[in-house]
Structures are given as structure tokens and as C-alpha cells.
């Protein structure tokens, strides 16, 4: 198996991890990840009710397209692309982009080693029961992992960004600009682009005399996510973003959506796969499948 977070096969996420593991920024206690999505690409923050019925295109089987979701009338606002912003069909900015842009933090900060974590919505505008909010900031908090201290991970979407870190002059670029990540440590600040590329210390002057650490993580030939998958299928090493890696990562990402739906801080036990401070929130860990589309047990 291989999740389609293509950046995980690139050298960028590995260079970033090696820099952090070598202590380039000291002990990381905060990370900030941001995206420009949805950026008007699909509806967020409204409409707050189902769209009016339109004739179903002759080339479309609407029942099959709806699948497991609750039945509703067809409208072109849902398909073929803008389903992403609707709660019944998609997972918004988090579900679309976090498995790409949060990947460097998940990997380099070894967040998968945490047995528990919490999530709370810091900001969400345009919240309603039909679509994901028009913009949001979500805070994930993880306990210590090995020799890594507790860390807070902040997610920003739809153009929201973290403040410029103390000591970094105005005009210096964070991430790729519209997307990226920022790591705040006891010894400095490090930023990287959308898929972990162009990892560098800030202010920019700190990179003049910086010597990259020796490579310690195996590289994927050509950084090609698809060839990595095919090599695994042919009996090679497991793909780098196989289910053992991608499953827990996605679980963490999407727990942020549950916190947004509940509009409160939630605590999660990874081994029990359960919310521990609000039993009612556990209903969001699964869904009720439409009759005829249930999963066989």
C-alpha cells in the first residue's frame, strides 16, 4: 500500500528530519503548518443547507456517486470536484492537504510514537452542519516522545499563517510562502516548504555557515512515489508511506476535524482508538452507512 502523499518520497522531508535530529534548532516545542487551500476552490463556510435539486446528468449514476453518504438531491456544486468542502462527502482543508504538509512534522518529530494526544479548535469561521468552516486554526498537543519534549502543532488553512517568529526580520520567507511549515526550537527556528523541501534555518544568515548533517535516512530513487510503490509490489522494501505509516498519520490529521465538529478540546487514546474526555464525541469516529452500502462484518 502507498498513500498519495507524494512528498514523503522526496529528499526534502529527509533533509529536514536529519537537520532536526542533529539539533540544528535544538529541542522543538512548537510547529506551525499552513496552506492556502481551499482558497475558493470548493465551498467552505456555507451554504449552511443542502443545495437545491438539479437534473442529474445523463452520464452520471447519482446513487453510486452518493455511495455510503446520506442521500440528497444532485447539484453541480457537489460533483465532480467541490464535494471536498461538504461534511457528508469530504474532509475540508485538513483532509485535503494536511497529509501532505503535516507529513514533515509527523515524520521528523516522531509524532507516531505518542500514545495519546489532544486537539482543540483555536479558530473556525463560518461553521455550520453542511460544510467545513471557511477558515480554521487547529492546535494538536503531543506528550514527550523519547528524548523529544512535548510539542504543540498548529494548523492554519485558507491563507491564515503563523506570526513571524521573534528574531526573524520582516521580508524573510516562511515555507514556500502560501504553504509550508515552521519549527520553533530551544536553539533556533527552521522552516520548510509544502513537502518539506528547502529546509533552512532562520534568519537566512544562519544558513551561510551551516553544514548539513550526514545522510542517515535511506533515499527513494529519484524521489518517485509511484516507483517506490511499484518496487514494493515487486518484492522490495515496504513503500515509504505504506499503511503502517499512513494509517496512524491520517487518523491524527482527521481527529482535528472531529474537534472542529464538537467545537471543543478533545483527548484521544491511540491504542484504544477512543476519545477519553467526551464519550459523546466517539460517534464521529465512524459513520452510519446508507442502507445497502453497509460494510460487511
Image: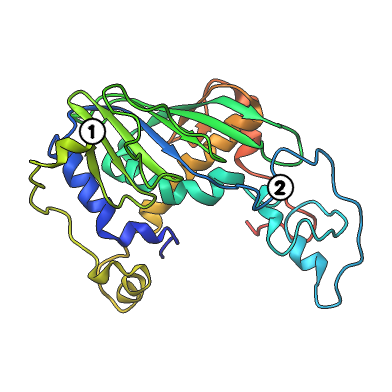
- The answer to whether 16 is drawn above or below residue 168 in the figure is below
In what quadrant of the picture does the N terminus appear?
Answer: bottom left
Using the rendered view, name the quadrant where residue 124 is placed: top right
In what quadrant of the picture does the C terminus appear?
Answer: bottom right
Q: Residues within 10 Å of mark 1 (few under 14, many from 20)?
A: some
Q: Which residue is mark 2?
A: 43
Which of the two discs, 1 and 2, labels the residue nearer the N terminus?
2
Q: As rendered, which of 294 and 235 lies closer to the eye?
A: 235
Residue 261, image x, y percentages: 65, 32
Contact between marks 1 and 2 (CB within 8 A): the answer is no
Residue 130 visible = yes
Using the rendered view, name the quadrant where residue 169 is placed: top left
Residue 236, image x, y percentages: 25, 73
- The answer to whether 149 is drawn above or below residue 75 in the figure is above
- Label 2 residue SS: loop
Task: Find the residue positioned furthest to the front.
Answer: 171
Q: As rendered, which of 190 and 112 lies closer to the eye?
A: 190
Drawn side of residue 4 relative to residue 203, left or right: right
Q: Residues within 10 Å of mark 2 (few under 14, many from 20)?
A: many
Which residue corresponds to the image point at 86% horizontal and 77% vertical from the top-left?
A: 58
Q: Which residue is mark 1?
A: 203
Drawn side of residue 220 relative to residue 34, left or right: left
Residue 281, image x, y percentages: 63, 29
Q: Distance of mark 1 from mark 2, alpha carbons?
A: 37 Å
Which residue corresponds to the image point at 47% horizontal and 46% vertical from the top-left?
A: 98
- The answer to whether 43 is drawn above or below residue 255 in the figure is below
Which residue corresponds to the image point at 24% horizontal and 66% vertical from the top-left?
A: 220
Drawn side of residue 92 relative to residue 49, left or right: left
- The answer to whether 206 is drawn above or below residue 52 in the figure is above
Residue 202 visible = no
- Label 1 residue SS: loop
Amino acid at each position: 500500500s502507498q498513500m498519495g502523499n507524494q512528498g514523503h518520497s522526496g529528499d526534502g522531508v529527509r533533509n529536514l528530519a536529519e537537520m532536526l535530529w542533529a539539533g540544528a534548532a535544538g529541542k522543538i516545542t512548537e510547529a506551525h503548518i499552513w496552506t492556502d487551500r481551499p482558497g475558493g476552490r470548493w465551498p467552505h463556510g456555507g451554504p449552511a443547507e443542502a443545495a437545491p435539486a438539479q437534473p442529474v446528468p445523463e452520464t452520471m449514476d447519482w446513487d453510486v456517486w452518493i455511495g455510503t453518504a446520506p442521500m440528497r438531491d444532485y447539484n453541480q456544486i457537489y460533483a465532480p470536484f467541490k464535494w471536498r468542502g461538504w461534511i457528508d462527502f469530504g474532509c475540508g482543508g485538513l483532509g485535503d492537504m494536511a497529509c501532505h504538509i503535516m507529513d514533515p512534522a509527523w515524520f521528523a518529530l516522531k509524532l507516531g510514537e505518542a500514545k495519546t494526544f489532544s486537539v482543540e479548535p483555536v479558530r473556525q469561521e463560518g461553521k455550520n452542519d453542511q460544510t467545513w468552516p471557511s477558515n480554521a486554526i487547529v492546535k494538536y498537543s503531543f506528550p514527550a516522545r523519547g528524548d523529544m519534549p512535548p510539542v504543540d502543532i498548529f494548523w492554519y488553512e485558507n491563507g491564515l499563517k503563523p506570526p513571524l517568529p521573534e528574531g526573524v526580520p520582516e521580508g524573510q520567507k516562511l515555507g514556500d510562502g502560501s504553504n509550508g511549515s515552521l519549527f520553533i526550537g530551544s536553539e533556533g527556528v527552521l522552516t520548510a516548504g509544502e513537502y518539506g523541501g528547502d529546509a533552512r534555518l532562520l534568519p537566512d544568515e544562519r544558513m551561510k555557515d551551516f553544514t548539513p548533517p550526514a545522510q542517515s535516512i535511506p533515499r527513494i530513487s529519484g524521489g518517485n512515489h509511484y516507483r517506490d510503490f511499484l518496487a514494493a509490489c515487486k518484492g522490495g522494501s515496504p513503500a515509504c508511506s505504506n499503511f503502517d505509516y499512513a494509517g496512524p498519520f491520517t487518523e491524527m490529521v482527521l481527529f482535528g476535524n472531529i474537534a472542529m465538529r464538537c467545537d471543543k478540546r478533545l483527548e484521544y487514546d491511540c491504542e484504544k482508538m477512543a476519545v477519553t474526555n467526551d464519550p459523546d464525541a466517539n460517534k464521529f469516529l465512524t459513520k452510519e452507512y446508507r442502507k445497502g452500502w453497509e460494510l460487511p462484518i
